Every structure is written in C-alpha cells, then in structure tokens.
Amino acid sequence: MSRTTRWGLVLALLLGGCGGEVRQEVRLLSGEQRQELASSHMAAVVLEQAGVEVSISQANLGQSWQRLWAGEADVSLSIWMPEASSPFVERFFERLHDLGPNYLGPRLDEVDWPAGDRPHTLARRALERSAPEALEILAGLRWQQEDLEWVLAEWEAGGDPKQAAEAWLARKEGTD
C-alpha cells in the first residue's frame, strides 16, 4: 500500500472513532466504466469507515461536471483530466476543488479516454463546510494498480463492487 493511501486510511479510521459529531453525508458520482465504479466503491468504504454516509450514483463526464457545479452531488473520482474535461473546465471549475489524480498506476485497456488523462477527484467547494473531514480523506486517496486490480478481480468473482471494496479495505487493515 502506498504511503498516501495508508495515511488516508489511517485518517479515516481515526475520524471514525470520534463520537458525538453530526454525521456527514457525501453524494458521490461514479463514471460508468468498471475501473471508475471500483474506485468509487473503494472511496465509499473508506468514508463509511470514518462514519460518513455515502450514496453513489452513475453519471457520464459531462453530467458529472454539471451535477457537481449545481450542487446535486458532492464529489466524483471519475473526472478525467486534462484533455477530456477541457470543454467543462472554464464553465464549471470555479465552484469545484481539484483534489488531484486518484489513480497512479498505468492506464487499464477498458479506459477510453485521451492518453495523457488521469481520473481526478473533484469536489464541490461547499464540501469544506458540510463535510470537511470527508474532504480531507478524499484528498488523501490515491489508488495503486494492485489495489484497483484486486477490487476488480474480487468484484468479477463475487458480483458486487461494494462487497469487493469492503473486502479490499478489510485486507488492507489486516496488513497494516
């Protein structure tokens, strides 16, 4: 596990132990490709471990930009940048935080985006007020190739992306 992913998980676990706070909610948008769905479910289980309520819905790239800008969703880990998102940046970016690329491994063959693009995590700026701990966790999440491949294989074997992500997190917690 990378140092960045480990710190994100540690932060999530520490924040999950804090009681008496208002429960935070995050509306997460996922792309439609398996890699994007797996990544979204991985983020969701880390956030849920920290006590954040998470809902996931699917949207294509243009819909994701529009829904984040309009406040209809809070975050997406499926915003491919820079080239694929160039038509949306000027119009929508002022209300959003780019938390950077969230997948650091080589590109998967199923991904049909420009060669130099990587999936970025974009969050509504208002998330700083409504769910600051969730925003901090999301900013620290960076998937390695082996993490994503493990979740995809587990999903293929078991048929459920959430269960695969939960098994991945349990496995990671057991190796720390």
Image (cartoon, rainbow, N blue to C red):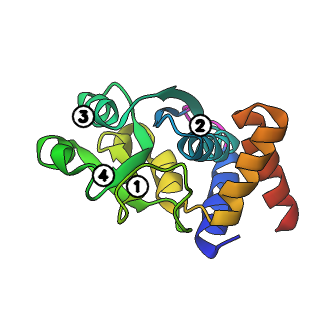
Residue on which disc 1 sits:
120
Per the image, label 1 sits on a secondary structure element best described as strand
Distance between mark 2 and mark 1 Cα atoms: 21 Å
* Disc 2 to disc 4, C-alpha distance: 19 Å
Q: Where is mark 2, residue-wise?
A: 52
First in residue order: circle 1 vs circle 3: 3
Work out whether residue 100 can be spotted: yes
The stretch of residues the image draws in magenta is 19-23
Q: CA distance from mark 3 to mark 4?
A: 11 Å
Foreground mark, 2 or 4?
4
Q: Nearer the viewer, residue 147 or 149?
A: 149
Query: Going by the image, does 38 lie left or right of 176?
Result: left
Q: Residues within 10 Å of mark 4 (few under 14, many from 20)?
A: some
Label total for image: 4
Q: Which residue is mark 3?
A: 69
Question: Can the viewer see residue 94?
Answer: no
Q: Give the left or right position of residue 90, taking residue 67 as reference.
A: left
Image quadrant where one finds the C terminus = bottom right
| Dot 3 and dot 2 residues touching (CB under 8 Å) | no
The local secondary structure at tag 4 comes to strand
Dot 3: element: helix
Q: Is residue 130 left or right of residue 162?
A: left
Residue type pointed to by label 1: His
**Mark 2 or 4 closer to N-term?**
2
Residue 37 horizontal/vertical position (percent): 57, 39
Please rate how many residues cluster around mark 2, counting C-alpha atoms within 10 Å: few if below 14, some from 14 to 19, many from 20: many
Q: Position of residue 126 (x, y in %)?
A: 31, 39
